[in-house]
Image (cartoon, grey):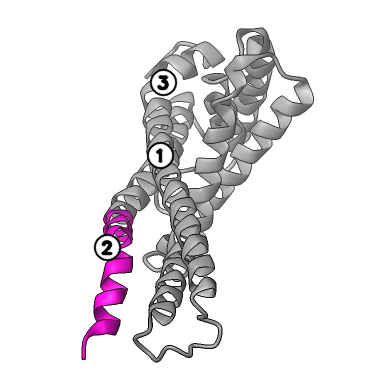
């Protein structure tokens, strides 16, 4: 049995790999969101351009017949706008996962994305507290979603402050260690819980979060590729469909 006292440094050393895994998963999610934002912006731009051209062609009256040029431009613009509305992770996830999974995944992703800017400059204690509170909320949501994952009550503060500690500016190192010390004390509220059990519970939380985000990304990537592929040929596909006798 481990005899070393449970300190912030020991917790960080033992669980750094788990934190890095969560960071990497969140980075993949952020990159996927970036792809979708770029795709959505492009689709909306193309839809606006075609909408203006359709208006110039007299599409508002649809006087040229179903296969008139104005009607085709209008249909293309509508198809692009419809695809743009589907180009979001929320839309993709809700088609493949439950709402609670979506909430937990997006909460983790947004949290890590916000933390990634912490090392640029020192922040106030109030700001640090807000980031720790956000992580505790994500921990609570994960425990509800994955009750058999090995996560434990009273370990949210330590888990959250541990993750924040890997992102903060060096000037905030002492502040976040104070939060970790509080987290260790809180995790020990169960008298029968050993320090090793605390480390295992925190590790379980980090791995559960990483697996959730990784799974979401793995399931969303094919849908994003399909959207991008459809976007490449959408105008041509609509025109071909409308011109068929």
**Picture quarter with the N terminus:** top left
Q: Nearer the viewer, residue 184 or 62?
A: 62
Q: Residues within 10 Å of mark 2 (few under 14, many from 20)?
A: few
Disc 3 versus disc 2: nearer the observer: 2
Residue stretch rendered in magenta on the structure: 222-245
Residue indicated by mark 3 = 16
Q: Position of residue 11 (x, y in %)?
A: 48, 19
Q: Position of residue 88 (x, y in %)?
A: 46, 57
Q: Is residue 55 magenta?
A: no
Task: Give the image quarter of residue 126.
Answer: top right
- Is label 1 in a helix, a strand or a loop? helix
Q: Is residue 237 magenta?
A: yes
Q: Nearer the viewer, residue 37 or 11?
A: 37
Residue pictured at 51% horizontal, 11% vertical: 9
Residue indicated by mark 2 = 233
Mark positioned earlier in the residue sequence (3 or 2): 3
Residue 74 at least partly seen: yes
Task: Give the image quarter of residue 70.
Answer: bottom left
Check the image and report above or below for 172 versus 60: above
- Is label 2 in a helix, a strand or a loop? helix
């Amino acid at each position: 049995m481990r005899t070393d006292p449970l300190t912030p440094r020991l917790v960080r050393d033992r669980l750094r790999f788990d934190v890095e895994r969560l960071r990497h998963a969140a980075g993949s999610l952020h990159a996927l969101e970036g792809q979708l934002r770029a795709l959505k912006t492009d689709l909306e731009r193309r839809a606006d351009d075609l909408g203006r051209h359709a208006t110039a062609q007299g599409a508002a009256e649809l006087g040229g017949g179903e296969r008139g040029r104005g009607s085709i431009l209008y249909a293309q613009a509508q198809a692009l706008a419809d695809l743009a509305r589907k180009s979001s992770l929320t839309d993709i996830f809700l088609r493949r996962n439950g709402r609670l999974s979506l909430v937990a995944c997006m909460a983790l992703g947004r949290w890590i994305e916000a933390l990634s800017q912490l090392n640029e400059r020192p922040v106030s204690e109030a700001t640090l507290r807000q980031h720790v509170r956000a992580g505790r909320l994500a921990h609570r949501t994960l425990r509800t979603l994955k009750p058999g994952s090995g996560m434990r009550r009273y370990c949210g503060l330590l888990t959250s402050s541990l993750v924040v500690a890997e992102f903060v500016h060096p000037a905030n190192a002492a502040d976040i260690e104070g939060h970790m010390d509080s987290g260790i004390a809180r995790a020990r509220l169960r008298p029968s819980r050993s320090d090793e059990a605390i480390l295992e519970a925190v590790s379980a939380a980090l791995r559960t979060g990483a697996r959730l985000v990784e799974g979401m990304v793995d399931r969303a990537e094919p849908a994003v590729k399909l959207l991008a592929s459809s976007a490449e040929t959408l105008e041509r596909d609509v025109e071909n469909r409308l011109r068929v006798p």
